[in-house]
């Protein structure tokens, strides 16, 4: 069953990886994966108040998933110009 699942899902992978998955799927696995790997990971929500890691707000978490821009993108130059104008104003 695992081999069939890997072979079926390999079409969605990059061609190079898909070929590797097909090759590996053709070999019989002698060891079944641990059941813990097949279950979703549940991380409880905690309120961290000590020094060290702290909780992030929803806006920060959402921003972390956005596409990043590099230091040479035109949008970054615009942001830097706005920062310079703000500093000059102060």
Image (cartoon, rainbow, N blue to C red):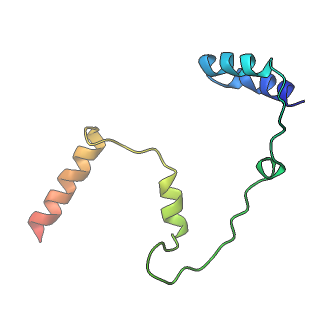
Q: Left or right: 12 with respect to 3? A: left
Determine the image quadrant of residue 87: bottom left
Residue farthest bottom in this picture: 49
Q: Classify the position of the C terminus by image quarter.
A: bottom left
Determine the image quadrant of residue 16: top right
Residue farthest left in this picture: 88
Residue 34 percent coordinates (x, y): 81, 47
Residue 41 percent coordinates (x, y): 73, 57
Q: Classify the position of the N terminus by image quarter.
A: top right
Which of the pair 36/80 is nearer the observer?
A: 36
- Work out whether 53 lies above or below 51: above
Q: Residue at x 17, y 64 (%)?
A: 86
Residue 20 percent coordinates (x, y): 67, 19
- Work out whether 41 lies above or below 51: above
Which of the pair 28/58 is nearer the observer?
A: 28
Residue farthest right in this picture: 1
Q: Left or right: 10 with respect to 48? A: right
Question: In this figure, what is the number of numbered marks?
Answer: 0
Residue 3 percent coordinates (x, y): 84, 25
Q: Residue at x 84, y 38 (%)?
A: 32
Q: Residue at x 21, y 56 (%)?
A: 82
Determine the image quadrant of residue 33: top right
Which of the pair 58/83 is nearer the observer?
A: 58
- Work out whether 72 lies above or below 89: above
Q: Residue at x 83, y 36 (%)?
A: 31
Q: Left or right: 80 with respect to 47? A: left
């Amino acid at each position: 069953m695992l081999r069939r699942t890997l072979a079926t899902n390999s079409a969605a992978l990059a061609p190079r990886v898909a070929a590797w998955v097909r090759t590996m799927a053709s070999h019989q696995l002698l060891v079944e994966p641990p059941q813990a790997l097949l279950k979703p990971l549940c991380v409880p929500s905690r309120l961290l108040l000590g020094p060290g890691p702290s909780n992030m707000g929803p806006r920060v978490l959402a921003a972390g998933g956005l596409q990043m821009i590099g230091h040479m993108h035109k949008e970054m130059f615009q942001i830097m110009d706005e920062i310079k104008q703000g500093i000059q104003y102060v």
